[in-house]
């Protein structure tokens, strides 16, 4: 881990890698999520390093591992205009949900998704919070 982490910190994605990722996407319709979101490496190996404790408390998903549904609990006061995205490990977005009301929790139907690991992101204008999600039907 330390070698990969050290290399990741010393060599972030540059313009060439970003352009290559875009070209590959135009042919294969999938992306390298670690080029688009370099923070994923830190979050996968050490989730508390990637997010502050406050961020974890503001956004939670359960159950995880999930079956056919998950509940997303949002304890932030400003939860208006939030986008929830679930991506597979290739970076392909497989589910998107726009939240326009300040409800404290929402339920998402996962029945169309296959078993596996996913990344669930909560996006507002101010920040993006990403957590791992495992689906087991």
Image (cartoon, rainbow, N blue to C red):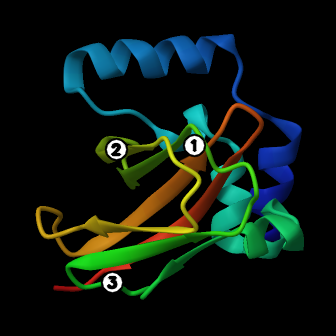
Task: Using the rendered view, name the quadrant where residue 69 is placed.
Answer: bottom left
Tag 3 and tag 1, C-beta contact below 8 Å: no
Whether residue 74 sits left or right of residue 47 in the image: it is left
Tag 2 and tag 3, C-beta contact below 8 Å: no
Query: What residue is shown with label 2?
Result: 96
Report helix, strand or loop for mark 3. Answer: loop
Q: Nearer the viewer, mark 3 or mark 1?
A: 3
Closer-to-camera residue (42/3): 42
Q: Position of residue 91 (x, y in %)?
A: 40, 43
Residue at x-position 73% and y-position 49%: 78
The answer to whether one can see residue 13 in this image is yes
Label 3 Cα crowd, 10 Å radius (few <14 / some 14-19 / many 20+) = some
CA–CA distance between discs 2 and 3?
17 Å
CA–CA distance between discs 3 and 1?
24 Å
Report helix, strand or loop for mark 1. Answer: helix
Label 1 Cα crowd, 10 Å radius (few <14 / some 14-19 / many 20+) = some
Say which label, 1 or 2, has the lower sequence index: 1
The answer to whether one can see residue 46 in this image is no
Closer-to-camera residue (41/10): 41
Say which label, 3 or 1, has the lower sequence index: 1
CA–CA distance between discs 1 and 2?
20 Å
Q: Nearer the viewer, mark 1 or mark 2?
A: 2
Query: What residue is shown with label 3?
Result: 66
Location of residue 42 with respect to 111 vertically, above or below: above
Location of residue 73 with respect to 38 vertically, above or below: below
Q: Position of residue 82 (x, y in %)?
A: 56, 43
Report the residue that reaches farthest toward the left.
112
Residue at x-position 22% and y-position 17%: 27
Identify the disc placed on residue 34.
1
Q: Position of residue 2 (x, y in %)?
A: 83, 68
> Quadrant where the C terminus lies?
bottom left
């Amino acid at each position: 881990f330390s070698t990969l982490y050290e290399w990741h910190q010393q060599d972030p994605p540059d313009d060439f890698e970003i352009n290559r990722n875009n070209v590959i996407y135009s042919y294969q319709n999938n992306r390298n999520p670690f080029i688009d979101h370099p923070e994923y490496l830190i979050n996968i190996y050490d989730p508390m390093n990637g997010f502050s404790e406050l961020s974890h408390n503001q956004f939670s998903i359960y159950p995880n591992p999930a079956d056919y549904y998950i509940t997303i609990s949002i304890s932030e006061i400003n939860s208006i205009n939030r986008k929830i995205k679930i991506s597979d490990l290739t970076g392909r977005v497989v589910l998107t949900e726009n939240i326009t009301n300040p409800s404290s929790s929402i339920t998402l139907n996962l029945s169309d998704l296959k078993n596996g690991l996913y990344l669930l992101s909560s996006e507002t204008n101010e920040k993006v919070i990403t957590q791992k999600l495992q689906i087991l039907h």
